[in-house]
Amino acid sequence: MKPRSFTYHAPTGLEEALAILAADPEDSKVLAGGQSLVPMMNFRLASPAQLVDINRIPGLTGIETEGDRVVISTRTRHIQVQNNGLAGPLGSLLRRAAAYVGHLPIRTRGTFGGSIAHCDAASEWCLVASLLDAEMTAVSAARGERTIAAADFFQSIFTTALEPDEILLRVSLPALDATWQTGIAEFARRAGDFGIVTATAAVQVLDGVVSEARVSIGGVSEVPFRSSAAERVLVGRPMSEDLLVSAAEAAADEVDPPSDTHGDAAYRRDLVRALLPRALGETTVIGA
């Protein structure tokens, strides 16, 4: 398979890249890692007239702590996120989530921001962003920078709140102090395949009782699914294995998953029941 012909741009500055996008926003695509876009172009599922390669633009890579937030720049490679030096529950979650992203060559080339902007329903990074109520900062030549909450950013499969003339600059996540515990569990047919269902969780436990809970599930809807039912079950109760099972049951009852060649709706609900306790069970404070 080969892509349709296109014009390739390799700007060396952000303003130059934005100007190219502004000239033809509806028929342009931003190229970072290309691990999703290039295969789609080869299968002619995407046929942009021009590619804007942002790999030569400085300042778009890195993981920084800014007060009580952790900011991941858009072109940060998956492998950099996997090898992050962050202490605490956020660093742990990012390392575990990154291990599920494709295979090593994909993690070496693919980017954190590219995955967020691509908005695949099976994306681990979209799931983490949803789980932690991330804030996405985008920029355009016409309007400058704006920040978009995760709840507004992910709209449907391959569709986000990004405008055609915008570039995603960075993603901001809460740092999470030591009272938080995080976890992720995923089921795929083979290692490196897209997850059929992925469960992520973050819980704050004070004196053995869950004071705040966040649960987000992938593979059961077009975008990451925040399970308010599971979160309600968890909050205000002592952390225990029985509580994890109850939360998983609530989540399985709440979701309305699709049926496809990888599994029907009932199968996906069973995966939610199995995976969410594993994700929550990664907490180390049960009974504390």
Image (cartoon, grey):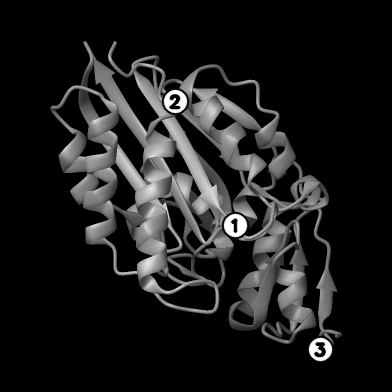
- How far is disc 2 from disc 1 in space, using C-alphas? 29 Å
Q: Is residue 153 something one can see in this rendering? A: yes
Name the quarter where the C terminus is drawn: top left
Name the quarter where the N terminus is drawn: bottom right
Query: Type of residue at label 2?
Result: Ala
Q: Secondary structure at mark 2?
A: loop
Q: In front: 168, or 34?
A: 34
- View extreme (left): residue: 236
Left or right side of 114 for 7: right
Of the two numbered discs 3 and 1 on the same chain, state the one appearing first in sequence.
3
- Among the 4 quarters of the image, the one containing residue 10: bottom right
The vertical placement of 158 against 1, above or below, is: above
The vertical placement of 127 against 172, above or below, is: below
Q: Nearer the viewer, mark 2 or mark 1?
A: 1
- How far is disc 3 from disc 1 in space, using C-alphas? 32 Å
Question: Which label sits on residue 4?
Answer: 3
Query: Type of residue at label 1?
Result: Ala
- CB atoms of marks 2 and 1 within 8 Å: no
Judging by the rendered image, the residue that carries numbered circle 2 is 175
Left or right side of 81 for 234: left
Judging by the rendered image, the residue that carries numbered circle 1 is 188
- CB atoms of marks 3 and 2 within 8 Å: no
- How far is disc 3 from disc 2 in space, using C-alphas? 43 Å
Q: Secondary structure at mark 3?
A: loop
Q: Secondary structure at mark 1?
A: loop
Left or right side of 110 for 242: left
Q: Is residue 134 something one can see in this rendering? A: no
Please provide percent x and percent y for residue 134: 41, 43
The vertical placement of 131 against 6, above or below, is: above
